[in-house]
Image (spheres, rainbow, N blue to C red):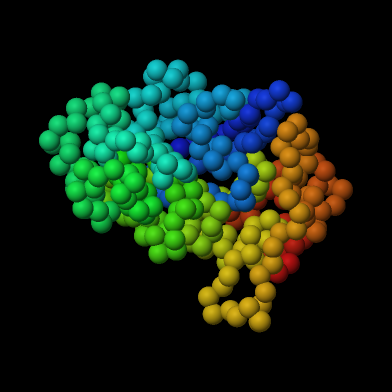
Amino acid sequence: MRENILEVKNLKAYYKILKGQVKAVDDLTFNIKKGEILGLAGESGCGKSTLASTLISRKPPLHHISGEVKLNGKEIMQIPEEDFKPMRLKNISLIPQYALDAFSPTKKIKTFIIDLVQEHGIKPDREFFDKVKERLYLVNLDPSVLERYSIELSGGMKQRVIMVISTILNPDFIIADEITSALDVSSQRFVATMLANLRDEGIIGSAMFITHDLSILYQIAERIMIMYAGCFIEIGPTEEIVKNPRHPYTKALIASLPQVGIQYQDKKLSGIKGTPPQLLNIGEGCRFRYRCQYADKQCEISPVRERINEGHYISCWRWKELGSDNNA
């Protein structure tokens, strides 16, 4: 059995604002194994990017409230910023959500890379840039992009350059935060596949791929974790989550996706009625109960995490009654 690269236990991270606390990540527990790509999915505002920020930066107004995060067995939530900074890019790295806006329009790509690695005490010499050029070839880019400005690159090219920069120190663990959201369909597939290739080449150890698009995760993730309103909903092997979801919210997400070979006149896509709850000072209970057609009085109590089978866990009081029918 593979060891865990990341272990998250009862993690809580809230935004502290004048009106109170926004419980954006509330009591999350999960792990990621060495060499694994874990997919993290859910609607916009469910806490996916907040989780990424909690793991990599934790800048105010976001605050770590409680819970443990171990990277390679080392607790990182209590590490001072001056000690954690050298770990970025090397031990843990991030491909940001807004990668297309990450570059300065007045700097060439090469200058941007030089400034970044010098902050980490790395000498950007000829040997270093030989490595950079090899990585550019790996993502199907010509090294000539180093002498170009970001405005000269397409969205897909910028995203691939950012992937090279974020993985240049062969990080143990990388977070890919909505890296396909601003790309066309063909570029989405290419970028997602490249992340898996970087793992296969040993350039990155493990990854957490954050997206709202389950179809992308189906291509590259070994397991998928579903979040809703800052909370854990369901986690399991990708095939089981996609083909046999058990939580009403997961089922609703799957039902909203188009299926190959299914015509609109035969089966219409269904959306999820209502909107996610406000997370400011939110109380107890299943947070999906306001939109769930199966909710009852018991759902006013926060559900416990239960094991369905090996590697498949869920937080829902009624999952046994609902069964495994995707149309339940």
Residue nearest the observer in this picture, 122 or 84: 122
Point 78% across, 35% down: residue: 283
Measuring from the top left, give residue 47's x and y in whole percent.
Answer: 60, 41
- Image coordinates of residue 227 in percent, x first then y, are 62, 47
Relative to 248, is 264 above or below? below
Q: Residue 8 placed where, x, y %?
A: 53, 35
At x 45%, y 37%, the residue is 6
Q: Report the number of discs.
A: 0
Q: Is residue 179 left or right of residue 320?
A: left
180 to 177, vertically: above or below:
below
Q: Residue 94, how many percent across, how many down?
A: 41, 39
Of the pair 203 and 1, the residue shown nearer to us: 203
Position of 167 compared to 257: left or right?
left
Front-lying residue, 232 or 126: 126
Q: Quadrant of the C terminus?
A: bottom right
Residue 50 visible here: yes
Judge whether 217 appears above or below 161 on screen: below
Residue 232 as seen in the image, left or right of residue 276:
left
**Residue drawn where x is 59% and y is 25% of the image:** 61
